[in-house]
Image (spheres, rainbow, N blue to C red):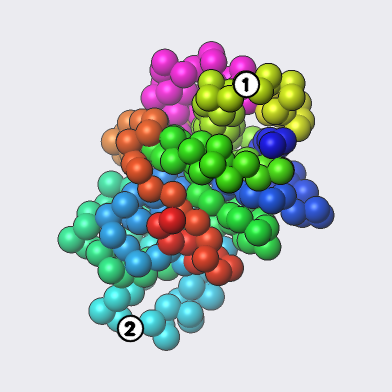
Amino acid sequence: MKVFVYHTPELTPTDPMPACAVVIDVLRATTTISAVLASGAEAVQAFSNIDELMAVSDRWPSAKRLRAGERGGAKVEGCDFGNSPLEYTPERVKDCRLFLSTTNGTRALQRVETAPIVIGGALVNRRTVVDFLLDRQPETVYLVGSGWQGSFSLEDTVCAGSIVASLLAQTESKLVELAGNDETIAAVALYEQWRDRLVDLMAAASHGQRLLGLGCDADLKYCAREDILDVLPIQKEKGVLVKA
Ligand code: MLT
């Protein structure tokens, strides 16, 4: 298995596609997707465009349809939800399909949607991602950070480092054997520096600062927690993720 970390969708090669793409948006899309599926939603359908989300979801039975839109960290007018993982209780989402569009995370999913395997990764479900990779042993794995509008994000790269560090701890591989690029080695170093103070890293991150400015302190605490959800979001058809 060779693991490649890419900091943003724009930096992620699409030819060739990897055997497995892990899309990471810790603040907050893939954390939210994991929480939504853990709460019993039927699926999460991702859209990079709000208008397309509205048009497609109009054709879904209203009793089983929820719409979530986020731009700049704030909820989009006309949607039932924003993008806080804390909103999605079982009472509100069970057996529903969540139609979701966010600033960066849904674009990252779209970038790699033609890969044979696409899964959603975050700190909250890090263990399930690692267990899946150890079990399936894909030849190439891209850990795709969502970043922020084309820029690097601390939180996504530290999560990629968390995944790689956990892979190393459970295999005989050495980092230089597992790493497919320099970014992978750098991601592990970032994680080793911050692993015991991930909430502090979230608060230092530019998007974390943006969310704190919106009063989303509880989101940062939740998104920083490792291995609290035993759920693996996996793409069953383009843009549609279900619990594996
Ligand atoms: C993103 O797509 O960049 C994030 O999900 C934004 C957010 O929810 O704060």
Q: Residues within 10 Å of mark 2 (few under 14, many from 20)?
A: few
In this view, 195 is above or below 32 = above
In this view, 142 is above or below 233 = above
**Which of the numbered marks, if any, corresponds to residue 104?**
none
In this view, 160 is above or below 191 = below
Give the percent coordinates (x, y) of residue 83: 38, 52
Q: Quadrant of residue 185?
A: top right
In this view, 200 is above or below 88 = above
Residue at the left extreme? 91
Residue positioned 54% across, 57% down in the render: 106
Quarter of the image where the N terminus is located = top right
Amino acid type, mark 2: Pro
Q: Nearer the viewer, residue 94 or 88?
A: 94
| Magenta extent | 186-208
Quarter of the image where the C terminus is located = bottom left
Q: Badge 1 is on which residue?
A: 172
Q: Is residue 206 visible?
A: no
Residue behind label 2 places its C-beta within 8 angstroms of ligand 1: no
Q: Residues within 10 Å of mark 1 (few under 14, many from 20)?
A: few
Q: Quadrant of residue 157?
A: top right
Residue 233 in the figure: left or right of residue 133: left
Labelled pair 2, 1 in contact (Cβ < 8 Å): no
Give the percent coordinates (x, y) of residue 147: 60, 41
Q: Badge 2 is on which residue?
A: 61
